[in-house]
Image: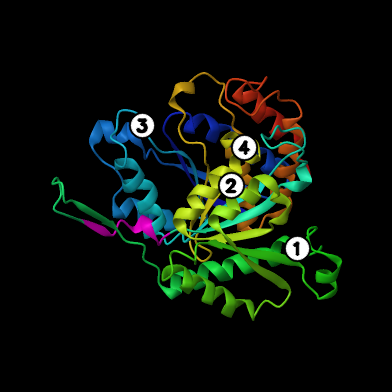
Amino acid sequence: MHYKLAIIPGDGTGPEVVQEGLKVLKAVESAFDISFEFTHFDWGGSRYLKSGKILDDDELDSLKAFDAAYLGAIGHPDVKPGILEKGILLKSRFDLDQYINLRPVKLYPGVATPISNIQPEDIDYLIVRENTGGLYTGKGHFSKKGTPDEVAVQEMIYTRHQVERCVRYAFESVLKRHKDNAWRGLSDEEKKKGYVGQLTLCVKTNVLTFVYDLWQRVVDEVAEAYPTVKTNYVNVDATCIWMIEDPGRFDVIVTGNMFGDIISDLAAVTQGGLGIAPGGNINPKGVSMFEPIGGTAPQFTGQNSINPLAAIGAAGLMLDHLGAFDAAKSIDQAISKTVTKMTSMRAGEMGLTTSEVGDSVAGEVVI
């Protein structure tokens, strides 16, 4: 297998963590029948400050020639917030139709979680967040701006097409997770009924009665094509509670853009922090982008002390998406072995340098 990858190191500590991810991918080349072709792009805050250029349509279109994109982080302290985020990150998601944000939530053995009496087997689920609709489209307006009577309106807009394709992806994700084994959280009675996994709809139908009525109806309709997947509904506020009190009840969560943004970061904290949480922006029929979710962390730039595991995990998530399942599994196992050597998931407190963490994971990549 040969893959062409677009590499976007970005800003702050992004280039440092991407470097370690590439180190692990090169180890994959040595251990598996896989080769990579890396093409680097300098998109980010530094280029913007030099040239005023963000990301034009031709540049973005060039990504379509690649199998996937691998991103470090975008954001610069000298650039006004929103310029890079909207001009690069959101533009990429919308224009490349990366309509799924995928966030695996997994607690590795030996990693500290702020939740008491929780074991690694209790935190192992997937968040499927709709990534191109809802409040994040920027639709809205001001009325009487700057006056005491000002009104600000931000519109949450979803089409059935957007909701249905996200929901179908989530159902398929349940089946993929449990191709060989039924979900550990199912009761014996549910297993006897033939269920192999569970999909939880996380929205707010009791208050947002238009948009999320659509979501509920779509889930109910699509569920008919997936009789082995148990479905249930949990309000977003209750979801946040259960993510702390009983995370083992979750298998795959499907949700909208805004709620997904919030609960996925909460989930990352429960699995050990942003330094270990990877993510993917997915277009199942186009080019997808994979990244760590911890941001640029400019205060750690150049110190060789930032945790690269989220970026390395994103590389594994990318391989899984591309169909290199054995290589992706090997990276996941290598991460699990490496965390036992680290004293903390926090940047600067790891007990290992950034490059040493990368060396360790690369050294554990085996068939």
- Separation of residues labelled 3 and 1 (CA atoms): 41 Å
Question: N-terminal of the two: label 3 or label 1?
Answer: 3
Q: Position of residue 43 (x, y in %)?
A: 37, 40
- Separation of residues labelled 2 and 3 (CA atoms): 29 Å
- Secondary structure beneath dot 1 equals loop
- Secondary structure beneath dot 3 equals loop
- Separation of residues labelled 2 and 4 (CA atoms): 24 Å
- Secondary structure beneath dot 2 equals strand
Question: N-terminal of the two: label 4 or label 1?
Answer: 1
In the picture of the structure, the residue carrying the numbered disc 3 is 76
Q: Nearer the viewer, mark 2 or mark 3?
A: 3
Residue 77 lies, with reference to residue 36, above or below; the image says above
Q: Residue drawn at (54%, 51%), measured in percent from left and top?
A: 280
- Secondary structure beneath dot 4 equals helix
Quadrant of the rendered image containing residue 48:
top left
In the picture of the structure, the residue carrying the numbered disc 1 is 178
- Say whether residue 33 is visible: no
Q: Which residues are magenta?
A: 132-141
Count residues near mark 1 (Cα–Cα under 10 Å), then give few for <14, some for 14-19, many for 20+: some
Q: Position of residue 121 (x, y in %)?
A: 78, 47
In the picture of the structure, the residue carrying the numbered disc 4 is 276
Quadrant of the rendered image containing residue 107:
top right
The three-letter amino acid code for the residue at tag 1 is His
